[in-house]
Image (spheres, rainbow, N blue to C red):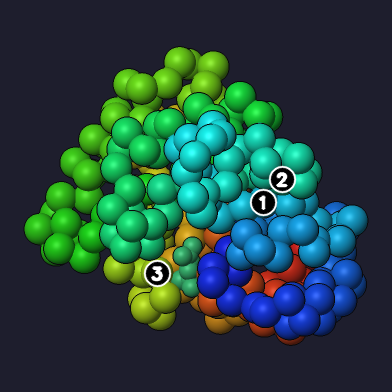
Amino acid sequence: MLVLNNKCNFTKNEFIDYQKELQEIAATANVILCPTAINISNFNLTNISLGAQDVSKFSKGAHTGEISASQLASYNVKYCIVGHSERRTSFHETENDINLKIKNLLENNIIPIVCLGETLLEKQENLTSEKLTNAAKQLKNNLTKEEVNKLIIAYEPLWAIGSGLIPNITELEQNLSILKQNFPHNKILYGGSIDTNNIKIFQESTLLDGYLLGGLSLNPTSLKKILKILKNN
Ligand code: PGA
């Protein structure tokens, strides 16, 4: 599984051109494209699933600027990223907000892709295990077992996002195993500075079900390269 997070990129015409290039992507790979919300209505690919980058915690009503889960569902959105660190940090999203978003998504049959990860400071102070355990606990406390089992979990160390830095395989497996213990029935993805050179390191992991690509998702040539590498292994 490959989740493409376009973040706040591509004007209308740029997105149309981008999609033309993505049309060639092999239908065999399970690729989920999460465009900027305004580009969702221009999504026209059949070889790729549609995702969103965020959703409102409100189900409908007087909430200027918000987009609800039922609105996303009406545009055939099947997946939605929730709790990305950029939303937690820049938009002060809380665990309670994330929980409400997950519930709204599940009610509308959209699969939440929930992002968790440690900051650089937490890593430096050896607090990663505690951070991941607590994050998992909080997430599970607020949801039923059935709801938890529907989630896709994305391990995204904050210090790795957009930085060019990545965990080594030992560190990666240690942290993923904490998530796997907490979410034994869920798909687990990794996201943070994946590129065509380092993807091989992540392929060594025995615990990963896929990858979340930010910067690299914007470049169809690199995307095709990544898919080729994944296919050959
Ligand atoms: P990056 O972003 O691949 O640009 O590091 C990943 C993400 O934020 O999900």
Percent position (x, y) of residue 79?
65, 44
Element marked by disc 1: strand
Question: What's the distance in space between the residues labelled 2 and 1, CA to CA?
Answer: 5 Å
Any part of residue 30 in sight: no
Element marked by disc 2: loop
- Looking at the rendering, which quadrant does residue 158 occupy? bottom left
Q: Earlier in the sequence, mark 3 or mark 1?
A: 1
Q: Which residue is mark 1?
A: 51
Question: Which is nearer the eye, 68 or 160?
Answer: 68
Q: Which mark is residue 43?
A: none
Q: Are marks 2 and 1 in contact (CB under 8 Å)?
A: yes
The answer to whether mark 1 is within 8 Å of ligand 1 is no
3 or 1: mark nearer the eye: 1
Q: Which mark is residue 77?
A: 2
Whether 100 is drawn above or below 32: the answer is above
Q: Are marks 3 and 1 in contact (CB under 8 Å)?
A: no
Tell me the crowding category of disc 2: few under 14, some 14 to 19, or many 20 or more residues within 10 angstroms, Cα based: many
| Residue at image location 40% in from the left, 39% down from the top | 98
The answer to whether mark 3 is within 8 Å of ligand 1 is yes
Q: Which residue is mark 3?
A: 161
Percent position (x, y) of residue 67?
57, 47
Left or right? Give the position of 1 relative to 100. Answer: right
| Residue at image location 52% in from the left, 22% down from the top | 147
Q: Earlier in the sequence, mark 2 or mark 1?
A: 1
Question: In the rendered structure, which amino acid carries the disc numbered 2?
Answer: Val
Question: In the rendered structure, which amino acid carries the disc numbered 1?
Answer: Gly
